[in-house]
Amino acid sequence: MDNETCDLAIIGSGLTGLSAAIAAYCKNPDLIIKTFGISYDSNTAKKGDIENIPGVDTIIGVDYIQKLTEQIDKFSSEFAPEQPTDNHFPVIELINENVIALNNLGSDFEIKTPDQSFVSKAVIISTGIPELKGTIKGEDEFVHKGVSHCAVCDGALFRGRKAAIIGNGNIVARGTLFLRKYCRKITVLCHTETLECDMRYLKKLTTSSNIQIKYKIPINSLEVFGSLVVQGIKYKELQDEKELSVDAIFVELKDKPNIVYAEDLNLEITVDGHIKTDEKNATNVSGLFVAGTARGEKDYVPILMGDGYKAGVYAAEYLEMKGKN
């Protein structure tokens, strides 16, 4: 069976990828676009309350993703004939599978999922930054037994309990502010000298009576303990060994971009481990673009939305030029 074809494949269907799909469609509604990934498992879907979108008061991350997918559904059939006679509809197809291989075929790309294979003229990578797992002693042993990697997803399960959240940045700040609605006490174990989050978040955290922040806690000193479920976590503070009694531990550490599926493309990588791009989001591989945190953009919803949109526009322009050659 021949591989299914498309004009533009977008690897990663969170906020950035969906924004890229919308941009490319608006630039040229005749493009056949396919996005790959599970939108409701994206970083944006796990953000909880989002309050920094201009013109939008507050929206929950998963609700925002739903609005984007509904918008894409409408675009996908905007120009569809009443009696479709070809395979060009839907124009934007959301494929709920992760990509396991991306190969350069010369003028095109091959995209493989566990169940399907596609050929595309251009590709946008927008997979974001994955969670860093398995770095804390006892972490794997107690997953689903009190250890979670998403405070927004599982915080409500620990209503009235004590919790610890590990990491830094806005993701930890937002997660902690979400937990304070449910948990009796939250302790932030931060491995850096400051929480490295927006001051607006920090002000809310430091004025909350049920939140305590501990800084410069070495990651390698952390150890989850318990019997059948989590009972607490050990850590080192100023060389002193300490224990914290908690019912839940939320590990919110981030890894480097995962591009193992594209390792044969010889993509240029920055010193920070991100995919290197130019001002048009293009990589050193012709026809391959990157958007969002995978190329080092800051994890702010408006920035990620804009960067995805920009990549979608430039990818559409690339396809237009390619069609003329």
Image (cartoon, grey):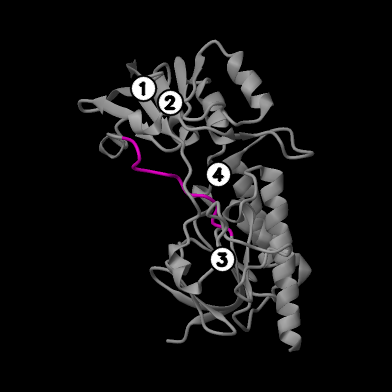
Number of marks present in the image shown? 4
Q: Give above or below for 291 relative to 104.
A: above
Say which label, 3 or 1, has the lower sequence index: 1
Give residue 116's position: percent from left, percent from top: 43, 73
Report crowding for label 3: few under 14, some 14 to 19, many 20 or more residues within 10 A (C-alpha).
Answer: some
* Residue, disc 1: 236
Crowding near the residue tagged with mark 2, few <14, some 14–19, many ≥20 C-alpha atoms within 10 Å:
many
Q: Which residue is mark 4?
A: 45
Residue receiving disc 3: 268
How much space separates mark 4 and mark 1, taking CA atoms? 33 Å
The answer, for residue 183, to whether it is visible in the render is no
Across and down, in percent, residue 161 comes to 39, 18
Among numbered discs 2 and 4, the one appearing first in the sequence = 4
The amino acid beneath tag 4 is: Ala
Other residues around mark 1 within 10 Å, as few (<14) / some (14–19) / many (≥20): some
Quadrant in which residue 92 is drawn: bottom right
Disc 2 marks which residue? 217
Seen as rendered, the residue at the extreme bottom is 325
Say which quadrant the N terminus sits in.
bottom left
Q: Main secondary structure of the magenta part?
A: loop
Q: CA distance from mark 1 to mark 2?
A: 6 Å
What is the secondary structure assignment of the residue under circle 2?
A: loop
User: Is the residue 69 above or below the residue 280 in the image?
Assistant: above
At numbered mark 3, what does the secondary structure look like: helix, strand or loop? loop
Residue type at numbered disc 2:
Ile
Give the magenta part as a residue range.
126-136
Residue 175 image position (x, y, % from top left): 53, 30
Q: Which of the two marks, 3 or 4, is nearer to us in this view?
A: 3
Residue 27's place in the image compared with 220, above or below, is below
